Every structure is written in structure tokens, then in C-alpha cells.
Amino acid sequence: MEARHVDLDDEAWIESTIFGLHNLVSSGSLNNPTIDTHVIRMDESRIRLAANVFANSHDGIMITDPLGVVVDVNRAYSKITGFPPDELIGRQSNLLTSDHHPVEFRDSLRESLQTKGFWRGEVSNLRKNGKLCTEFMSVSAVYDSIGEVTHFVAIYTDISALKESQRQLEHLAYHDALTGLPNRVLLVDRIQHGLAQATRRKGLVAVCFLDLDDFKPINDLYGHNNGDLVLIEVAQRLKQAVREGDTVARIGGDEFAVLLTDLEGPQDAKTVILRMLDSVARPYSVDSATAVISASIGYTLIPGDDGDPDNLLRHADQAMYVAKEEGRNRIHLFDIEHDQRTRSKRENVSRIKKACQDNEFRLFYQPKVDMRRGKVVGMEALIRWQHPELGLLSPADFLLPLGDHPLLVDIGNWAIREALGQMAKWQAEGHQLPVSVNISGGHLLDPDFVSSLANQLAAFPQLNPRDLQLEILETAALEDVAHVSKVIKKCTELGVQFALDDFGTGYSSLLYLKRLPARTLKIDQSFVRDLLDTPEGADAIVCIQALASAFKRKIVAEGVEFIEQGIVLLRLNCDVVQGYAIARPMPADEVQNWVETYRPDPAWAASLKLPWRRSDFPLLAAEVEQRRWIKIVATAVKREDSELLLSRIRSLQKSSFGHWYYGIAKDRYGSMPEFKKIPDLHMNVYRISAEIGACLSRGEHTQASALLAEQNACSRVLLEGLVTLRKAIVTHTQKPVLPPPSPSFL
């Protein structure tokens, strides 16, 4: 057949390919000497159709002989590769023209053609101009009638534009549009890989969270376009500050995150992070002006912090907020224990909210008594949580962890309302009992506190507002004395009284006492506890009493656990007390019966009739210690703890009893018959205690329990001896002092 070549002419492209396609389609039939002209016309028509398809296909087509020599290429192939037909036809073909494919890939392609006669997949080839082209290629073998390969046909689809669009979409999906940095999605993936790598190599990884300080003024002063330029500059500076292999990402707004890998130690991480901090803090040129910003960076280290990438970023974010709270332009390492406390606090707050809704709180009441008059003068309302699973909980178990949470306002309002309702109920039953309620400093400073209190009082018009006393911590009052003073004055206008709780623990009590119109000072129980244990204990009470007297305040001593403490407080003119020596906090339905049956301890009335000298207070301390010793021995036996006893026996002379007995007692009371009995009684108690300790150390718990009853009996005899001595001392001091005899020569 005749073939003619006319450049860029469709008909010419078709005619030029007829010869090659004729051989491809009907090479076997041309050798037949008997040729049917009708068949020839049909073959020519089919060949022309195939040639038309070949020439006009948008996919590149290359035809080779069995040895790979190029027989023909279509126009699309030349357009894709840039090679014209005359540079290819008659030459050895090369299906893969770039070095992007490894040897294994080429071997797999060759093997597939030899065994299957077909291969297809994605390849990278070079155009004539040297640029890379991504193609989808399929290669098929063409067989004759006896099954021999006569040709190979390779079809190429140029997918370079598609791959570039895909690459751009992937870039947008994993990178920040403004800065070009990885976004959170890509960062999380890299953190995951970094963690796996660190596990294999036993290395250290740091996840950092960075927030620009005061970036908003940049946008406000210079506009968002200039703000974006600053963010781009920050991104570049961060990339320059970190090491190769580290990842800087933009999370959003003015927040960035950084992944540091292959760290040698914590100091290595700190060095890089400080370099980032310094880099960000350098001045920026913004719209012909100079702007200065800083950053706060929080970070966490792995190993040391467990969790998935999202949790690690959250931890670094939490540390960043701590850095801001500490003054900004600084770094902070995530504290796992602090995070656990924070989570525990959130869980606690959630559970307490539910307790409020389910009415699980209760008010218990602890009496206040006037020892001198032997009279109940009021009650302190103390909140308790009747937990469904944990039982009755004290405020230390659920209120202290709240800190200054706003939930305390709701709890405080509930306590006031509950106390007022109980007061009204007692009053209806014939008992008018003043009640004091503890409120937090945050509750007192709540803007609606005064109005809310007025509404609650109005709901119980039968009550005298003076019977309600609100107790606030002295330390809380000192945080904002001026404001607290105004609130207290407004409340006193309603008739409500105030007391400063834990008085004496504040650092400026004298300076601010006059400015706080609280009528009552509650002496902190630590002073009462030290009253008999240290020589300075009574002096502290005397000072507080003098201070209260000077400012015309009443005082109440809390935490009285022993009758002897009450004796000393009476001697110091501190008459109103509360504590376990009087009664433990009790439910509201037990108060009325307790009040009706209450009788003051006879020792208090006796001490009023027989004044007790301050110089004899150490004897009272010795009595208190003996009462404590009974509890200590019982606890040691219960816990089977021998060291609890033996260690205290070894330090006997350093105890309150030892201080009294080996100190002033012999000199002051040595001649008194009542005193001479004490040493034997005391040694008998401690001898049995030592035997109990020895039994416990040998594991003889049954024998220790049997000795406990004997020890308790001896302890009671010793206590009776000390009380007898105390009475004898008082009686002795009341004897009239006779004048010395006159000399005989006068």
C-alpha cells in the first residue's frame, strides 16, 4: 500500500499508519495466494477505521515488533513525549525513560509481559525537554494465528496534571494555607511516627505548643494583612530555630506546635525551645514600623508522658497556659501530677454538682458552751456529704479540693437556707438556738451576696436575724479588707452577726482587726492544741484575749478536746468553747435531746472555786498526755504496730509528762504525799506498755490484747493520782500565809 506523510494533517496521519496496522491486523492472511477482493475491501475498511482511532486517540500509542523496535506511534504519543515519529520509528523502544524506577520494578514489568503478555500501572518518564511526566501505561502483546508474538502495543495516558492536582489537594489537606507549614492533621501523623521511632531507638521526643502573646494588637493597629505577614515571618523563624528533622506546624490563629525528635535529653529540648522563644521575640518590621511580640511555650516530654498525639498536644497546651499565667514570654514543662489533680478536680466538681441536685448534703451541728455559766450558747452548722457509696464525708474530703470554684456560692446559699429552716423548727419546739454558718471568701464577695441573704431572711420572719452568725476565714477576709468590710456592714444592717474563723493564722490581724466589723473572734484550734503542750501556748491565748478586749470583740475557742484544756481556758478568761470535749457534731434531730440533757463537767466549776495558777499548767499537760497515751496503746494493739509504742517509750523524757516530772514537779511538789505516789504509778503504766510493745514485736498479738486491759486499769489509777495531786495543789495554795515569827529579843 502507498503511504504519504503530510505534517499536522489528520488524513496524512491515518494514511501513514495503514501499512503498520495492515501488518498488525492481517499479516497472516496476506501470504495467502488466493485473495478474495471482497475480503480485501473489508480488511481495508477495518484497517482504515483502526487507523482513524489510532490517529485521533488522546492516549499515546506506540507499536513495536517482537524485538521492541518501534513500528509506529500516534500523534498523541508525540504530543505527550515531545518526540516526533521520525525520531522513534525504526529504533529500539524504551518503555521506561526515567531512573525513578528501581531494578525490581523493571524486572517485574518484563516478567509480566513474558508470562502474561500484559502489564499496566503508573510510570514516570522523561519528555524530550527533560521534564518528568507521570503516565498510566498499559502494554499488551499481539499474537498471530499460531500464537507467536508479532507486536507489542503500549498505550500511555498522561496523568501529570491529575497528579499535580492531587498533590496540591494533599498539600492543602495537610498544610496551612497561609504559612505552608504542616497543619494539625499532618502533625498528629508525624507525632505518631516520632513516638514509634523513639520507642525503637529508646530516644526522647518533645511536643511543644506555642501561642503568641498579645498578637491581637498587631491586627488592630496594622490590619489583618500585615498580621498575616507577621505570622508568615514567625513561621520562618521557627523553622530556622529548630533542627533538621523537627516539625513546625500551625494549629490555627496565632498558635503553633513543634515536634522535636531524636533528643539526647531534657536539656537538649529546653535549648531548642529557648532558641524558638528568642527567635520569636526579635522585632518585626510592620508597615514602616517596628513591632515586638513574644511567645509562651508549653511542652511535654516522651517518655515520661503517656498518651496519644492528641493528648500530648493537649498536655503541651495546658503547660502553655501555665507559662502565660507565670508572666508570658517563658516556657513551662507539663506537670503530670498537676494534670491529674486538675482532672480529679473536674471530676469532683461534676460529682458535687450532682450531689447538690440529688440533695445529698446534710448539716451537722456542734454545740458552743459557756463553761463559766454552764450553758449552751449556740451551734455551729457543719456541712457533711452523705455519699451513696462512700458514706458520710467531711468538708475536707470535698470542699477543700474545690478551691475558689463558683460552686461554693451555691453550696453556701444552701447551707444558710438550711440553717435558717432548722432554727425556725427548733424555735417552734421551744429552743432558741443561735447558729453560725461557714461561708467562703468567694461567696462573701459574690455581687449578689447581700441581696440573696436578705431574701433568705425574709423567708423566715419569725427568726431574729441576730441569731444567725456567718463565719469567714480570717485569711480570706484579709485578701480584700475594704470590700469585705463593706459587705459585713451591709449584712449587720440586716441584723446578721459575723465571726472571724481560725483567728490568729493571718499575718496582719492587728493591722486590719479594727477595719473588720466582725463581733466574734474564733481562736484557731492550733493555739488550743498547744495550750498545754508548750510553755508559749497559754501566752498566745492571753495575747489574743487582750487583743479582743482592746477592740471589744468576743472570743470563742474551738478544738477543745480535753477537760483540762477547758480548765486553763477558764483561768485565762476564755469562757465560750466548742470541741470534742463538749460534743462531736451531730445531726439536727439529736440536738434538742442533747441540749436538754447537757451538764457541764464538774471539773470546770471546781476550777472556778479553786483558782489554778499558770505555773501549775504543766501538770494539766501531763494529765492530757496520759489520756492520749491510753488511745496510743489501743491504736498500736489494733494495728499490731510495736514501733508506735517503743519509739515513744524511748523518748519518754521528751514528752509532756517527762518535761513536767523531770523538770519542775520534783522541786515544786516533791514534799507532797500525793506526788510521792505518782512515780510508781507512772512506771507501772509504762512497764506494761513496754511489755505490750515487746509482744507486738514478737507477733504475740493475743497476749498484747490481754495486757491492754491491765494497762488501761493502771492508766486510770495514774490519772486519778494526778487529779488528786491537782486538787491538793489548789488546796495548798489557798492556805493562809502566816507572818514569820518575831525575833525573841523584840
Image: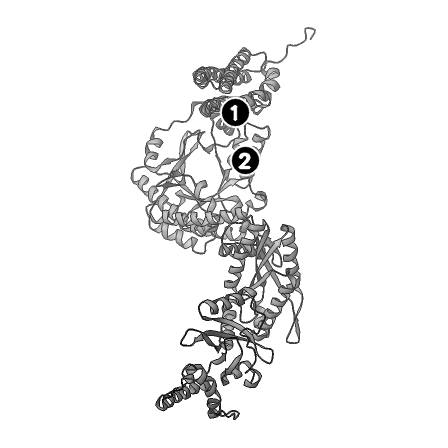
* Colour option used: one colour
Q: Quadrant of residue 420?
A: top left
Q: Can residue 251 be seen by looking at this rendering?
A: no
| Near-viewer residue (475 or 282) | 282
Residue at 51% in and 37% down: 523
Residue at 60% in and 80% down: 129
User: Mark 2 = which residue?
Assistant: 545
Specify the farthest residue to the left.
Answer: 429
Secondary element under disc 1, as helix, strand or loop, is helix
Q: Position of residue 154 (x, y in %)?
A: 48, 77
Q: Position of residue 119 (x, y in %)?
A: 46, 70
Tag shown at residue 644: 1
Q: Position of residue 16 (x, y in %)?
A: 49, 89
| Near-viewer residue (53 or 148) | 148
In the rendered image, the vertical position of residue 686 relative to residue 317, given as above or below: above
- Amino acid type for the residue under numbered disc 1: Leu
- Amino acid type for the residue under numbered disc 2: Gln
Secondary element under disc 2, as helix, strand or loop, is helix
Q: Residues within 10 Å of mark 2 (few under 14, many from 20)?
A: many
Point out the tag, 2 or 1, that comes first from the N-terminus: 2
Q: Can residue 643 be seen by looking at this rendering?
A: yes
Q: Residues within 10 Å of mark 1 (few under 14, many from 20)?
A: some
In the rendered image, the vertical position of residue 305 relative to residue 214, given as above or below: above
Residue at 45% in and 71% down: 118
Specify the farthest residue to the right.
Answer: 745
Q: CA distance from mark 2 to mark 1?
A: 37 Å
Q: Position of residue 345 (x, y in %)?
A: 46, 48
